Image: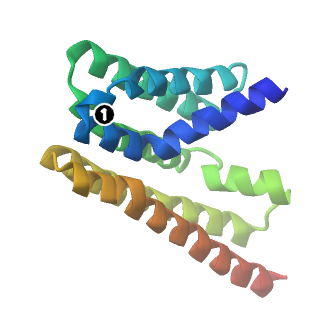
Amino acid sequence: MLAKRALSIAGGLAVIGWPFAVWLVIAYPHLHILLPILALCFVLRLCTLRGKTGALSRAFKGLAIAGAVLCVASIWMREAQLLLWYPVVVNGVMLALFGSSLFSRMSIVERLARWREGDLPPAGVRYTRRVTQVWCVFFIVNGSIALWTSLAGNIHWWTLWNGMMSYVLMGLLFAGEWLVRQRVKRRYE
């Protein structure tokens, strides 16, 4: 159990630390030794997800595979610029996950809410659908900016956006949604 927890932490660190590791590899080419380490972190992340089912687990597995493939392709092709595309892939996968759930019986946010809260009133179902739509807009905007920074090829802009600004905006979205949710819950209680 401890080994699985350590693997999960290593995989999570690979995802969070990705922009900074990419910046190091591109800005300091002699640090290309980080590429196999990053690939290993993604493989370890994939191992921790083995046996887990569900749309979210499948998305995380796909992202782990994409990260490992980008690392291996960068090593093989000797082209570290390929690493810049991972945030674009992440936003695309998350948009597909959240967006496709809008066409199912339950949105992804509703599933997560029911996991924590149990049954939801009709107003709660409408609210979770709206939150899912807001996240879709976030992934479109964030993914578009990640794409632009990848195409621009400026590692400093890319790192600033993908390593800091997108995380700040994501945190603000989480915090804002939590505040709105508390207000909505009080109104319907």
Query: Which color scheme did the rendering employ for the protein?
Result: rainbow
Q: Quadrant of residue 68?
A: top left
Quarter occupied by the C terminus: bottom right
Percent x, y of residue 172 = 52, 72
Direction from residue 63 to residue 157 in the image, left or right? left
Residue 118 or residue 39, whichever sits in front: 39
Residue drawn at (44%, 56%), measured in percent from left and top?
136
**Residue located farthest toward the top when viewing the structure as drawn:** 76
- Answer few, some or many: residues within 10 Å of disc 1's Cα (few below 14, many 20 plus, some between 14 and 19): many
Question: In front: 105, or 115?
Answer: 115
- Location of residue 120 in the rendering, given as x and y in whole percent from the top left corner: 79, 63
Q: Which residue is mark 1?
A: 83
Residue closest to the far front: 30
**Residue located farthest toward the left when viewing the structure as drawn:** 152
Instruction: Please report the residue visible at 24 percent of the width from the left and 42 percent of the height from the top.
Output: 27
The quadrant in which the N terminus is found is top right
Looking at the image, residue 88 lies above or below residue 39: below
Give coordinates of residue 13: x percent, y percent.
57, 41
Tell me: residue 49, above or below residue 84.
above
Question: Considering depth in this image, is 47 or 100 the residue closer to the camera?
Answer: 47
The residue located at (77%, 24%) in the rendering is 3
Q: Who is closer to the viewer here, 9 or 169?
A: 9
Q: Is residue 11 above or below residue 106?
A: above
Image x and y of residue 77, in percent: 21, 16
Q: In terms of secondary structure, where does tag 1 sit?
A: helix
Asked whether the viewer can see residue 86, the reply is: yes
Q: Give the residue drawn at x 36%, y 17%.
A: 72
Q: Amino acid at mark 1?
A: Leu
> In the image, 42: left or right of 151?
right
Horizontal side of residue 172 vs 157, given as left or right? right
**Which image quadrant for residue 169?**
bottom left
